[in-house]
């Protein structure tokens, strides 16, 4: 979480007005590190899976007991 906030701050304060690519001081590297962060840690409660899981649990039938 702290690394994500750090990357957001780097984008807003240093790269937002400079375009996209690194050679112009843009945000390409910051967005790449953010993507690697999501890949390594996962999106957690902000993921599509976390949004769909409660709905799927409500619809799932109760397991049969023998």
Image (cartoon, rainbow, N blue to C red):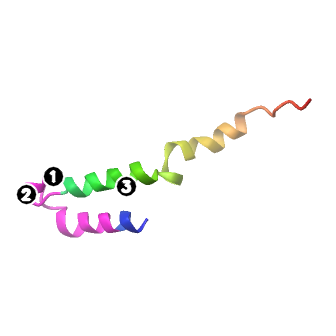
| Label number found at residue 20 | 1
The residue located at (26%, 54%) in the rendering is 31
The residue located at (56%, 47%) in the rendering is 50
Q: Kindly report the distance in space between the C-alpha atoms of the residues bearing marks 2 and 1.
A: 8 Å
Q: Is 38 left, or right, of 66 in this rendering?
A: left
Relative to 10, residue 24 above or below? above
The answer to whether marks 2 and 1 mark residues whose Cβ atoms lie closer than 8 Å is yes
Quarter of the image with the N terminus in it: bottom left
Q: Which residue is mark 3?
A: 37
Q: Kindly report the distance in space between the C-alpha atoms of the residues bearing marks 2 and 3.
A: 23 Å
Q: As rendered, which of 58 and 40 lies closer to the eye?
A: 40
The picture quadrant where one finds residue 55 is top right
Relative to 20, residue 14 above or below? below
Q: Which residue is mark 2?
A: 24
Q: Position of residue 42 (x, y in %)?
A: 46, 50
Q: In front of the other: label 2 or label 3?
A: 3
Q: Kindly report the distance in space between the C-alpha atoms of the residues bearing marks 1 and 3.
A: 19 Å
The residue segment tinted magenta is 6-26
Q: As rendered, which of 48 and 63 lies closer to the eye?
A: 63
- Residue projecting furthest to the right: 66
């Amino acid at each position: 979480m702290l690394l994500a906030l750090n990357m957001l701050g780097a984008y807003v304060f240093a790269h937002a007005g400079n375009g996209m690519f690194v050679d112009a001081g843009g945000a390409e590297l910051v967005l790449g590190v953010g993507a690697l962060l999501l890949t390594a840690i996962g999106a957690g409660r902000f993921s599509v899976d976390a949004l769909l899981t409660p709905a799927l649990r409500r619809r799932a039938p109760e397991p049969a007991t023998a």
